Structures are given as structure tokens and as C-alpha cells.
Image: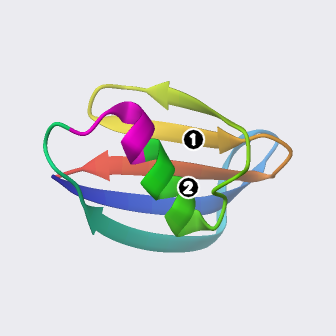
Amino acid sequence: MKCNVTITDTLGGEANYGWVNRYGFDLPNESSQRTITYYAKKAAGMTNVKSDTYDYGESLTIKPRGYAQVIFVDFE
């Protein structure tokens, strides 16, 4: 499974896209949400940052606590 990660800033709690960083990585199809979240946060440089993860079936949204940033994970 190919994962595309988009990291951007937020303004008022919503994605602002004032700047954007994009990364991609491959994982086995059976990967759990926890594994996907770990690798997405690792790509963003936020491995040990507590966050809230929202699962929308075809994508994940990760909101790190205390940061004005959001991480979007889409699957191919």
C-alpha cells in the first residue's frame, strides 16, 4: 500500500496551506492505523508528539497536540 503524507500549517484549527511538505512511503496492505500513524509522524519529524488521529476510511488526519500543523495521509 502506497501512503502519501501531506503536512501543512493550520489557521484557526483548519488547514491553511501557507506551506506544504509532502512525503510518501510503502507499507504492507495489512498495516494497522497505529503503524500508519507512526510512519506518517516519523516522516513529519513528530515521532514522540502526542496527537489525535481521525480515520475517514480512505484517509487519515493526524492533529499533533500543541502544534499549529496537521498531517493528512492518503492511500493509493
Look at label 2 and name its amino acid. Lys
Q: Relative to 41, does residue 36 appear above or below in the rendering?
A: above
Looking at this view, name the residue that lies furthest to the right: 66
Q: How many labels were placed on the picture?
A: 2
Nearer to the camera, 22 or 44: 44
Could you tell me what secondary structure mostly forms the magenta stretch? helix
Nearer to the camera, 25 or 68: 25
Look at label 1 and name its amino acid. Ile
- Give the magenta-colored segment's residue range: 31-36
Q: Relative to 1, does residue 8 appear above or below in the rendering?
A: below
Q: Is residue 67 magenta?
A: no
Q: Relative to 30, does residue 23 appear above or below in the rendering?
A: below
The span from disc 1 to disc 2 (Cα, nearest Å) is 8 Å
Residue at 29% from the left image edge and 26% from the top image edge: 57
Asked which colour scheme the image uses, the reply is: rainbow
Dot in front, 1 or 2: 2
Q: Secondary structure at mark 2?
A: helix
Residue behind mark 2: 41
Across and down, in percent, residue 64 comes to 71, 44
Q: Relative to 59, does residue 73 appear above or below in the rendering?
A: below
